[in-house]
Amino acid sequence: MAAGAWLKECARVVAAERERLTGLDAAIGDADHGANLDRGFQAIVAELDLGDEAEPGAQLVAAGSLLIRRVGGASGPLYGSALRSMGKALSQGADLSTALEQAVEAVEKLGKAVEGDKTMVDALRPAANAMALAVQEGIGVREALDRAARAAEEGAAATTPMRARKGRASYLGERSEGHRDPGATSAALLIRALAATW
Amino acid sequence: MKKLINAPDAVVRDALRGLALAHPGLAVDLENQVVTRAALTPGKVGLVSGGGSGHEPLHAGFVGYGMLDAACPGEIFTSPVPDQLIEATKAADQGAGVLHIVKNYTGDVLNFEMAAELCAEEGIEVASVLVDDDVAVEDSLYTAGRRGTGATLFVEKIAGALAETGAPLAKVAAVAELVGARSRSFGVALTSCTVPAAGKPTFDLPEDQVEVGIGIHGEPGRRRVPLASARELAEVAMDAVHGDLPLEGELLVLVNGMGGTPLIELYGVFAEVAAYVKGKGATITRSLVGNYVTSLDMQGFSVTVCRLDDDLTRLWDAPVSTPGLRWGR
């Protein structure tokens, strides 16, 4: 288990995809998703101890708190709460699948969003479900994570034709259709980073 | 992108440095991005607002006598974080509790909620009012609800005036709710705005088209229509407002510039708005024309209407002394 490695990979991927995320947000939101997440994850890398010795649950709780304190907007509290819930679950001895489920439930509860609303939940919910199913089938964590990442990517891609019902994109009504959701896209990147590092 | 900035990521900080130097009546915490009155009034209900930057003079420009006690500017178009709001709330709490004035956006609501919870745990009485006046957004299960736009200024001014009289938190919160409930807005954009960090206009709008039903974050509107005269565009906006809250009685009307439209055009729009109101048999008894709730360099206007009564008129007329709004004192 290497929460630090995951967080570093998140920071790398978000920095690399910053312009793309902001571009997606410009189409149906307010053109700041990439910049905001980048600011938050850069702060995590700069300010937290991401070494292997630290307890992964505590690292994730600290990272979540930092996102809440630095990012602002909706994505700061949402991703921040997700990491905090995941970290708390791990600290209490939960397995990764259960911890991921807790993270996704935190986002659903705080954002009051469900699948189909064209939000990050459209990537996160399928990821948690795929992971849980894989674990149930007795598949190893690595393969289970890969399935979770694929489910997140498919979920993010599936947001394109949706009409947004939550967040800023919902103001556009039918004009939000035909644009991929930036939150679902960044969520899929973070889950893929998890699969690549855990 | 052509902008008077030092660097895209220094825009908010640089503006706050300037605000502090230009207005000695304000105390500006540059580190935490919190603006408070330099002298707070013991025993008075505190008013705190905040939101993304890019809407100047909202909110920091409305800190001062008769309006806000503290404001928290976030990054451009990004809500402030809970730490800022907690610091502002603690500063504004002068023993009578604090009213949070929150524009209805998912991010603002989440961050204010987190801050209010933490402040309540520390024993500060916090009430919140959600401003959601923009009729361009359908308030339904299928949206995040109406946006908070121009009515925010009305709420801050009127609730601020009541707080100065020594009224308790429950009454200040109630008048804030009342103003919100009696106010409606609608906006039209001639151009997009350019977010400094993005470096290019948020949306492309052909020379001969306008966006109707825009918000204040460069988000596209509900639809595009061909460019029309000030009279026709004012009519589009007023039809939307009137369709939601019929114009009657005495009205406070704000014709607000989005940041890139000259005053000469805004006054032209006001003339059309006034004619429209007269045609409906209502009366504009108070008005405001200018750039108050802006969207960076966007060209366009919004119109906000509030149905007044005698109490609200008196509170609107009460003295105010802030960088962005000042009279009677």
Image (cartoon, coloured by chain):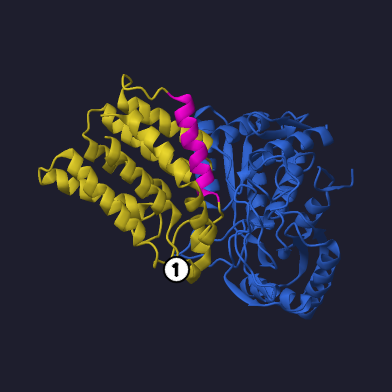
Chain colours: A yellow, B blue
Percent across and percent down for residue B140 are 48, 65
**Residue that appears at 65% across and 72% down:** B206
- Residue behind mark 1: A177
Identify which residue is drawn at 64% across, 33% down: B88
Q: Which SS class for mark 1?
A: loop
Q: Label 1 is found on which chain of the structure? A: A
The answer to whether residue A36 is seen in the rendering is: yes
Q: Which residues are magenta?
A: A32-48
Residue B67 visible in the snapshot: no
Residue at 45% in and 32% down:
A65
- Nearer the observer, B271 or A120: A120
- Taking depth in this image into account, of B54 and B101 the one nearest to the observer is B54
Q: Nearer the viewer, residue B107 or B30?
A: B30
Q: Residue furthest left?
A: A138
Q: Is residue B155 magenta?
A: no
Residue in view at x 79 percent, y 53 percent: B316
Residue B289: horizontal and vertical position, in percent?
82, 61
Frontmost residue, B248 versus A123:
A123
Residue A120 appears left or right of B176: left
Magenta portion: prevailing SS class: helix
Please, is residue A39 above or below residue B129 in the view?
above
**Residue type beneath disc 1:** Glu
Name of the residue lying farthest toward the top: A53
